[in-house]
Image (tube, rainbow, N blue to C red):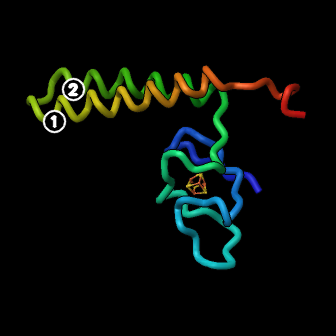
Amino acid sequence: MLYDNPDAFLICAFKRDNALCEPDAGTTAPRQYACQQGCGNTVRTDTHARQLRKRAIEIEQLAAHSPGPVGKRLRLTADKLRAIADAHDFTAQTAEALT
Ligand code: SF4
C-alpha cells in the first residue's frame, strides 16, 4: 500500500515490519506524522527532490533574517534537506529499471 506523505517529501511504501514510525501492532497504515529519516519504506521521485531543494532555499531565506543560533539551526536544516535531495539524485533509478 502506498501513502503520499507530502510533508516529508516522500511516498511511503508501507510495510509494517520495516516502519520506523512505530505503527501499532496489526495496523495497516503508517504514522505519517511520525515519519523518520532513513526508513526503508521511503520512495522519492525527482519531484520530491526538487521540492526538497525549494524548501531548503526557503529555509535559508528565513535563516538570513534570524538571530545567530536560530539562523545556524535553520541553515543546518536546509543542508539536511539538500543532502536528502543529493542522495536521491545519486541513487535514483528509472521506473523502467525497477520493473
Ligand atoms: S517512517 Fe515514514 S516512510 Fe517509514 S513507514 Fe513510517 S511514514 Fe512510512
Picture disc at residue 12: none
22 relative to 57 in the view: left or right: right
In terms of image quarters, where does ligand 1 lie? bottom right
- Label 1–label 2 contact, CB within 8 A: yes
Residue displayed at 45% across by 27% down: 83
Query: Where 62 sits versus 42, above or below?
Result: above
Residue with the most extreme right position: 99
- Please, what is the three-letter code of the amino acid marked with disc 2? Ala
Residue with the most extreme left position: 67
Residue displayed at 55% across by 63% down: 31
Within the image, what quadrant is residue 1 found in?
Answer: bottom right
Q: Badge 2 local density, few (<14 within 10 Å), some, or many (20+)? A: many
Within the image, what quadrant is residue 55 found in?
Answer: top left
Picture disc at residue 63: 2
Residue tagged 1 = 70
Across and down, in percent, residue 99 comes to 90, 34
- Please, what is the three-letter code of the amino acid marked with disc 1? Val
